[in-house]
Each structure stands twice: as structure tokens, then as C-alpha cells.
Amino acid sequence: MAAERPIIICTRGSALALAQSNLIAAQCRAAFPRLGFELKIIKTTGDKLQRASMAKAEGGLPKGLFTKELEVALMKGQADIAVHSLKDLPTDLPAGLLLAATPKREDVRDVLIYRSADFLKRQSGRTPGEPALRGFQPRLTVKDLPKGATIATSSTRRKMSLLAARPDLKIVEIRGNVSTRMQKVADQCELDGTILALAGLTRLNFKINANGTISGSAVPGGLLATVLTLEEILPCVGQGAIGVEIRADDERIAKICERLNHGNTFHAVTAERAFLHGMGGGCQSPVGAYAEIIDDTVSLQAVSFRDGQVKRGAARRPIAEAALLGEQIATELK
């Protein structure tokens, strides 16, 4: 491709969004060194509603909270590529736009973040009258949490997953980026822990060590982490995947996206997104799903917490029927 005007990649301005969009830009530059790629930061409705509850009943918040303004930029020709956390991208895209690529997915699992009992013992006393922080031993799991423990999350899926396993837990709201949420757990005695996505931690260069400690440039002192199993909490649809959205009629950008796409990831999230679409939900819908490619088939497991009932389903179909598989599980769980 001959050198032309820079190709504009639009993104949100959060640390995680910038990490993901810079990853995409680096892949583009490596594959097409003669082309120029520039980032354009756009503030979305979700960025502006920092105090809004993300765990309202379905329908309480509009779909596309973190994607709409990026899509408008695409449709107006102000950007050529929009980079999203795929979990935020609605399954119904505006006319004229399409999901063109999903690079290789990160680990889909969730992580329990909590304070270290040993670390707290080594600290000096707190201000007189200030409530004491509570700490725990490494490798803490959901079933190990003390009775009535308070976990902070704004995800309905995580909330319902936790309560299904431990009805005695107290679930409270939390907002802010990854670092902010970790700091709140470190500082606030009324919180015993929070749940974060392992993919987000990884892309922000945090590392969970074998002993449960967290390495990184801005980790609050004394925090530990346990990676939760898929049996404990199924991820949300598209978790760990990046979605690259473009104009449907832009063949030039589509060719670039072909070099970004990871086939197995694309087929897996196709099944998951078809399931979510079939359930009629958005990114805050109380459902979880995880698909993986096994040989020439796609296997999907899913859970729904709608109407206070826990319904689970699993099935496998040929890769070419990924969307049909998602629709099938949705029909079974409705």
C-alpha cells in the first residue's frame, strides 16, 4: 500500500483503552510499515457518567455506553478504526459498521483482589478510633471468604455469580479504573475485596505471582490476588478480547484488519455474542459465557441469572455454526 494520509484509530482515554489501542496500532505499523497510524481519544457517555450505577436493572442504562461516540466518529469519517474492549460492544451494531477483527484473546478469567493479613501485621497502628482493616492469607477463594464478607463489584454477572455460591456475602458498588479499585480495597475497611478481569490486569502490566502477590508499577501495598476458576465465575461475553470495528464499505481498512484478526478468537466470540444477542442483553446483562475452539468445533458454556434463577447450558458444534451454537444455548436458557 502506498503512503497516504494517516489512518485514524479512535479509542477511549482510560489507561486500559489506551493500552489496547496502542497494541492495535503497533500491530498495524508492523504489518504496514509504509502507512501512518494515529490515535484519536474520544470521551464516551460511560466516561462522563462516573457516578452512575453500572449494576442497575437491565434497561436502566443505555447500551453502547463506552462505544457510541467512537461509532459516531467512524460513521462521520472522523476515524477509520475503533478499538473497543469487546465486552463493551453491543451485539447490534449501527447500520454500516461491522466487527472486522479480534486479535488473540487474553486469559478470560476473573481475579479476586484482597488485603494480605501478613502485610497488615507488619504495619504501624492506625489512627486511634479508625476501624481496623481485615486481611487474609494467600490463595483466598470465594468459598474461603468469612461469613458476611463485603465484595465490591459493579457487574451484575459477578454479583449474581458470587451470591449463587455464597448467599451470605454483601455486594456493594464500586467505580473507577483498575488502579483506583485496587486502592479502594487497600484503604477502605468496609471492603474485603473486589473482582477484576485478569486480561485487564495483564494489559496494564500487572502480574500475579505464584505466591499471590501482585507485581506492577502502581500496586497498593499489601494486596494479594487469586485467579478464579471458570467453575467459580464464568466471564462476560467477549471478556479478554479486543474488538476492532470499521465501516462496512471500507475495503482498504478491511484488508488491514485481516492481518489483525485471530481466527479462533473470532469464532469463539461469535458464539458468545450470538448467545448474548439471543438472550436480548447488553454488557450488564446477568449472564456469562465462554467459548473455545477444540479441533474443528466450537464449545460453549453459559449461565443465566435472570429472574433469580440459575440456569446453565453447554454444547458443541462445528466452527462454521458458531453463531447457531450461541442461539441454541440462548433458546435453552431463556
Image (tube, helix red, strand yellow):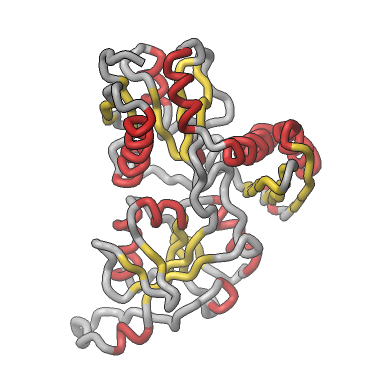
Q: Is residue 72 left or right of residue 167?
A: left
For the question of whether residue 142 can be seen, the reply is: yes
Of residues 219 and 143, the one drawn nearer to the viewer in this rendering: 219
State the image coordinates of residue 54 (x, y, percent, origin top left).
Answer: 45, 45
Q: Residue at x 61, y 47 (%)?
A: 286
Q: Residue at x 43, y 70 (%)?
A: 225
Count the numbered circles shown: 0
For the question of whether residue 307 can be seen, the reply is: no
Quadrant of residue 10 within the rendered picture: top left
| Image quadrant occupied by the C terminus | top right
State the image coordinates of residue 319 (x, y, percent, origin top left).
Answer: 72, 36
State the image coordinates of residue 89 (x, y, percent, origin top left).
Answer: 50, 33
| Image quadrant occupied by the N terminus | top left
Q: Residue at x 20, y 85 (%)?
A: 128
Q: Residue at x 45, y 39 (%)?
A: 85
Quadrant of residue 141 within the rendered picture: bottom right
Of residues 68 and 138, the one drawn nearer to the viewer in this rendering: 138
State the image coordinates of residue 285 (x, y, percent, origin top left).
Answer: 59, 42
Quadrant of residue 39 within the rendered picture: top left
Relative to 285, say whether 227 is above or below.
Answer: below
Of residues 32 and 254, the one drawn nearer to the viewer in this rendering: 32
